[in-house]
Amino acid sequence: TVREPLYRQLADLVIHTDGRSVAGVAAEIREKLADDR
């Protein structure tokens, strides 16, 4: 899909994010994507 590269980038961000839950990061990402619409 068109967004796949974006998701790969976000996956890298999640991997490199220390001390934060993946669920919290995912929720934040969803908020940002919703704001962009």
Image: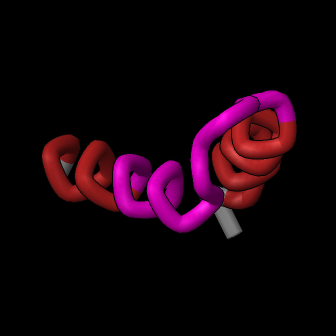
- Residue at image coords 59%, 42%: 20
On the rendered image, what quadrant is the N terminus found in?
A: bottom right
Number of on-image labels = 0
Viewed as shown, does residue 31 lie left or right of 22?
left
- Residue at image coords 68%, 43%: 10
Q: Where is residue 36 drawn, in percent x and y?
A: 21, 42
* Magenta stretch prevailing secondary structure: helix
* Residue at the front extreme of this rendering: 19
Quarter holding residue 34: bottom left
Quarter holding residue 14: top right
Residue 18 covered by magenta stretch: yes
Magenta region: 16-29
Residue 21 at least partly seen: yes
Tell me if residue 1 comes above or below residue 29 in the rendering.
below
- Residue at image coords 25%, 53%: 31
Viewed as shown, does residue 4 lie left or right of 26?
right
Tell me if residue 16 comes above or below residue 30 in the rendering.
above
Residue 5 at least partly seen: no
- Residue at image coords 74%, 31%: 18
Q: Where is residue 9 drawn, in percent x and y?
A: 75, 37
Viewed as shown, does residue 22 lie left or right of 24?
right
Q: How is the image coloured?
A: secondary structure
Quarter holding residue 22: bottom right
Q: Where is residue 6 drawn, in percent x and y?
A: 66, 44
User: Depth check: 19 or 33 in front?
Assistant: 19
Viewed as shown, does residue 14 lie left or right of 30?
right
